[in-house]
Image (tube, coloured by chain):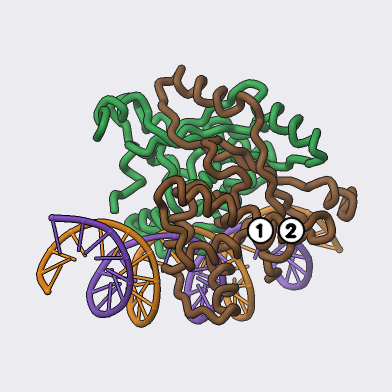
Chain colours: A brown, B green, C orange, D purple
Amino acid sequence: MATRATVGLRLKDHDHHHCISDAIARAEMLCQRNGARLTENRRRVLELVWQSHAPVGAYEVLEMLRKDGIRAAPPTVYRALEFLLEHGLVHRIETRNAFVGCPQPGQAHAAQYLLCDGCGDAVEIEIGGLARRIETRAAELGFAVATQTIEARGLCSRCQQSAPAGA
Amino acid sequence: MATRATVGLRLKDHDHHHCISDAIARAEMLCQRNGARLTENRRRVLELVWQSHAPVGAYEVLEMLRKDGIRAAPPTVYRALEFLLEHGLVHRIETRNAFVGCPQPGQAHAAQYLLCDGCGDAVEIEIGGLARRIETRAAELGFAVATQTIEARGLCSRCQQSAPAGA
DNA sequence: CGCCATGTGATATAAGATAACACTATGGCT
DNA sequence: AGCCATAGTGTTATCTTATATCACATGGCG
């Protein structure tokens, strides 16, 4: 199986180390502000999730932890991920059973995701009024929306080029 | 654990047997038309998925099959579900790892789902232009959408009443 | 100190999904 | 009818994803 965690790496396109360090910095600020404890475990897991822009499975995180010489079991990872989810630092990608860093933690937002089936990358977008539209229509049916999951799978522009028609 | 398969049953609200028989009838027509074989296994699995309006897990289907005296293993169920998915007779609910009957098979549609966390029921809706809107925005970013997953979780009107504020 | 809340470690197991291989049913063909 | 190819099924084993449970550690606070 392809190592999903690295497939989406695009170190040539941008300084990805920047993405990681920024994410950690934002997380530290946000936890400080909210009185939440960004422990060593949690920080490490967040870093690992941010290793690429492709969603990472919990067991991939586990492997990476172990490769870093840290003895960990599944609950360790899942607990860290749960914490990160609660604080909006990562999002869960339902169609992949995987997790990806949130570029804008802190701000409440109902995000949508574009998921490339070629390189695996996830791009978080927010289409204006979309979430609102769903809530409104649901309300008309008497349904109160709590959370939305909106994921579009397909091919990013680069992957369309490298895997053209009839591939 | 609550038996998800029965939670959503609303036999008092409507003649659910009608839902089931209609679904089977539509499936038979559609398979006839497409030259697909709705075998005994597949028909039975479709019936079982339609036992309620709540999405049903593959292993729940398996249990139900066994209670009906049919010796089956996971692949049997998954293969049937795969067939039904391919022909649009059921949809997969990603946020629940479960399957639900499609009320309008045959017509290509990018459906959205309202999923009640109270009774478990799933309601398929189609908000006009929503899918289009996502495709368009994705296209602006050079992304070609193949499939969309749109699921809103919350409470249906009935469950809002039975589990009011601060529950 | 004693207590409680929060976080962690470790083991076991639940829940969901698929791989692989052998066998059977079905429909088309000569 | 007999033969073949394809599609469908049965069976076993295994893989992936996710939690339950219990024991231990740490840190704040009366």
Quadrant where the C terminus of chain B is found in the figure: top left
Say which of B97 and D25 sits in front. D25
Q: Secondary structure at mark 1?
A: helix
Residue drawn at x 51%, y 44% is: B93
Q: Residue B103 or C17: which is nearer the viewer?
A: C17
Chain designation of label 1: A
Report which residue position mark 1 lands on: A20
Q: Tell me the amino acid under the disc marked 1.
A: Ile
Vertical placement of C11 versus A30: above or below? below
Q: Position of residue A158 (x, y in %)?
A: 85, 50
Q: CA distance from mark 1 to mark 2?
A: 7 Å
The disc numbered 2 marks a residue on which chain?
A
> What's the residue type where badge 2 is placed?
His
- Image: B34 above or below C14: above
x%, y% of residue D16?
Answer: 56, 67
Residue A93 in the figure: left or right of residue A33: right
Image spot of residue A103 (x, y percent): 63, 46
Q: Which residue is mark 2?
A: A16
